[in-house]
Image: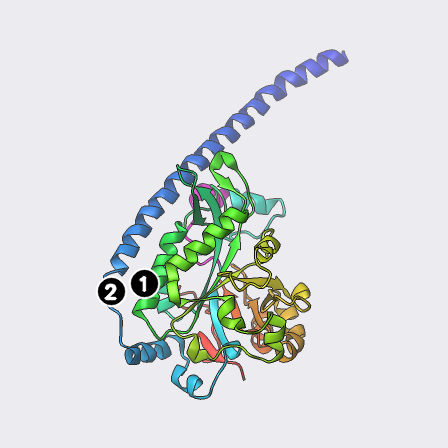
Amino acid sequence: MKKCKKSRAFRILTPVFCTLLFLAVVLAGVVVAQGKGDWRDWERWQKNHVDRLAFSKPQSNEAALSLERSRTGLDVAAAIANGTKLNRLRGILTHNSYKQKMSPVSSVIYDSLHLFGSGRKGEYEYTFPPLSAQLSSGVCGLELDVNYTKNADGSPRFLFFHAPLLDMNSSAIDAQLAMREIAVWSENNPMHLPVIILLEPKSASIPLLNLYGFDSTSLSAFDEMLRDSFGSALLTPADFLKDYPNFAAMRADDAWPLLQDTLGKIIVLLHPSDVSEEYIQRDETLKTQAMFPVFVWQKGIDNPNASFVLASIPREAYEKSAKLIGEENFIVRSRLDSWPEHTEEEYRLCMESGAQWLSTDYPKCVGNEYVAAFPGGSSAEILG
């Protein structure tokens, strides 16, 4: 009798299991086909967009300085006259700055994960204008997830997107084109506040999708791409350190560069990741590196290589600001919000913390009812 019941159950469950397996395979196929198709479409769009930008004409320094004030709300000329240093500048950054609308299939999958307690419903349903449009609106910095892939000849290539297959719609999908877009914008706006680019290397290695974890070779190739893209506009650790042996010594003297020496420049930060230590070990003085390694605040305080630190939780930024900013002269990045949530309390804590770089999913260039900005609506201010 028991054997008969098992046999009956097997006959009932087998079709159900096969149906679910078939649906899963079909769904995976749809996601794969959609992911590959969509990001190729974005790549074509991106190339045309950057080509159009190349026809823009650079402004005079005087006109560019006036425009920077109008779009950021900061009187840059006054800040320069007052001898303001870089670590007194505060600015708004966008989080996942390349982000574009996900496909309906991806949205359903992410929302399904929410039902099982993973993340928040609709947490990736935000979009941004192209990088150059964000900068023209007054955004002071960009945050980008970088993925390592390879060309047909095996040479390194880098892509900016959020998640393989599910969330690859990106206005900056090709990293080299994205850097060119920023470089062209910078050339056409010669007196802009320094553009901060926070890059987070993704560790996923999926050879089937031609995605690989970062290693020494790819890190070197990425540094080279940054130098080729930005040339003399790229500010590197060597430019900040000068004769100091490390950043701890530089910070002890509060020897951050003057704001006037950073106008029209690009500063690239390496987000804490699995490859941060490997990047530092390539040259522990950092003087031959293109990027500034960023540390989470708990580890950054005692690390001689630390100059920029993360205190992403607003309350932590608020509670630690006296030491991090007032005593140790760090530049701190925190987060004002996380789509689709924003609270008055987190906003207040971020603003009162004095954290210099504040990341948001709600920049003024998007048109949401809530806009993340400094009091008065500016996207930059000088720390009092």
Residue plotted at (49% across, 52% down):
220
**Residue 341 percent across, percent down from the top left:** 54, 61
Q: Quadrant of the C terminus?
A: bottom right
Q: Quadrant of the N terminus?
A: top right
Query: Residue 343 versus residue 50: which sits nearer the camera?
Result: 50
Under circle 1, the secondary element is helix
106 falls in the magenta region: yes
Farthest-out residue, right: 2
Is tag 2's residue or tag 1's residue first in the polypeptide sequence? 2
**Residue 235 percent across, percent down from the top left:** 45, 68
Residue plotted at (30% across, 51% down):
47
Q: Is residue 173 above or below residue 255?
A: above
Q: Local crowd at mark 1 within 10 Å, few (<14), some, or many (≥20)?
A: many
Q: Local crowd at mark 2 within 10 Å, few (<14), some, or many (≥20)?
A: few
User: Are the residues tagged 2 and 1 within 8 Å (C-beta)?
Assistant: yes
What label does residue 184 carry, if any? 1
Would residue 265 be visible to someone looking at this image?
yes
Query: Residue 146 versus residue 380: which sits nearer the camera?
Result: 146
**Residue 340 percent across, percent down from the top left:** 52, 59
Query: Residue 218 versus residue 39: which sits nearer the camera?
Result: 218
Would residue 98 be visible to someone looking at this image?
no
Query: Residue 355 versus residue 117: which sits nearer the camera?
Result: 355
Under circle 2, the secondary element is loop
Three-letter amino acid code at the position of disc 1: Val
Which image quarter: residue 245? bottom right
Query: Which residue in the protein does label 2 denote?
Result: 56
**Residue 3 percent across, percent down from the top left:** 74, 12
- Read off the magenta span: 96-108
Our reading of the magenta stretch's main secondary structure is loop
Residue plotted at (45% across, 79% down):
259
164 falls in the magenta region: no
